[in-house]
Image (spheres, rainbow, N blue to C red):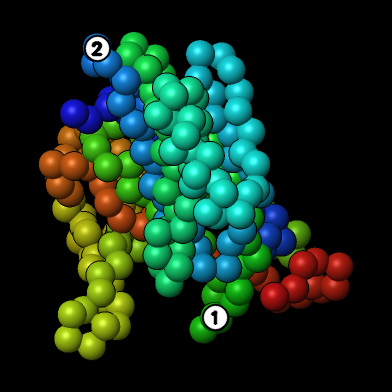
């Protein structure tokens, strides 16, 4: 039985090519018995987790770093005893997948907040920021907000259609499947807004339930990507790749 996700948000702030991203998910257990709440997240290959908190019944739990076998053992023991606990583990090292799970009592909600950081690298004349948008179900409150600030100025910004990474069975290489249910190729994903200044750009993506269901019955399962480049003048003092 699936838990109800009441909101899912991604907030990413990029300053001088250094990105701070916060992913927040709220799950509610409408059932009459406890269920396991699971939060999966795909991280960029070069990113590292800087903080993780879980809030249940106004109690805030901050993650501790333990040796993986010890952490798994502690979680299983707490789960069997009906205590609140969470376990964070890498499912697939190559694709940088993380899994967060906790036991959620009947009629309660859990808020997961995972923060990670990364230094964006310039490739083929541009920088790329990718955030994984895979809540696993239709979400009434779904929002992505990205702000990019560059002291020397932003030369251009491009947002391609949503994409999902697929692994080809024949050669084991990754290919990109572009998901564009409402617009032509190269157009913005639906419900995307851009506010641009000389040194700052703000992008919001707030798909409606109708927008989400157009991609699949389980909602959006894709990457939201931003390409941009900076004005290449007087970069001394800025973070360099």
Q: Nearer the viewer, mark 1 or mark 2?
A: 2
The residue depicted at 49 percent of the width and 47 percent of the height is 72
Q: Secondary structure at mark 2?
A: loop
| Image-quadrant location for residue 236 | bottom right
Estimate the x, y position of residue 34 in percent, counting from the top left: 32, 20
Q: Position of residue 193 (x, y in %)?
A: 42, 44
Residue tagged 1: 123
Answer with left or right where residue 224 lies relative to residue 53: left
Furthest-bottom residue in this view: 171
Q: Nearer the viewer, residue 113 or 162?
A: 113
The spot of residue 152 in percent (x, y) is 74, 64
Residue 152 seen by the camera: yes
Q: Is residue 124 above or below residue 60?
A: below
Q: Residue 36: name its quadrant.
A: top left
Mark 2 Cα-neighbour bin, 10 Å: few <14, some 14–19, many ≥20: few
Asked whether the viewer can see residue 144, the reply is no
Q: At 65% across and 65% down in the image, what residue appears?
A: 119
> Residue visible at 55% across and 46% down?
71
Q: Which residue is mark 2?
A: 32
Q: Is residue 185 left or right of residue 34?
A: left
């Amino acid at each position: 039985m699936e838990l109800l996700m009441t909101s899912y948000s991604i907030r990413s702030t990029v300053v001088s090519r250094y990105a701070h991203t916060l992913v927040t998910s709220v799950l509610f257990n409408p059932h009459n018995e406890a269920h396991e709440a699971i939060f999966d997240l795909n991280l960029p290959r070069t990113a590292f987790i800087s903080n993780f908190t879980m809030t249940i019944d106004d109690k805030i739990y901050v993650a501790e770093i333990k040796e993986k076998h010890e952490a798994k053992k502690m979680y299983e023991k707490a789960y069997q005893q009906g205590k609140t606990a969470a376990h964070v583990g890498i499912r697939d090292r190559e694709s940088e997948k993380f899994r967060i799970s906790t036991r959620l009592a009947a009629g309660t909600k859990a808020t997961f907040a995972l923060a990670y950081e990364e230094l964006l690298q310039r490739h083929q004349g541009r920088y790329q920021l990718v955030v994984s948008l895979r809540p696993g179900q239709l979400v009434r409150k779904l929002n992505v907000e990205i702000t990019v600030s560059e002291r020397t100025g932003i030369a251009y910004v491009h947002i391609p259609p949503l994409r999902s990474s697929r692994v080809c069975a024949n050669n084991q290489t990754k290919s990109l499947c572009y998901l564009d249910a409402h617009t032509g190729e190269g157009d913005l994903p639906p419900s995307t807004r851009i506010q641009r200044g000389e040194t700052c750009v703000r992008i919001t993506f707030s798909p409606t339930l109708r927008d989400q269901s157009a991609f699949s019955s389980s909602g959006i399962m894709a990457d939201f990507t931003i390409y941009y480049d900076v004005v290449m003048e007087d970069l001394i003092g800025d973070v360099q790749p």
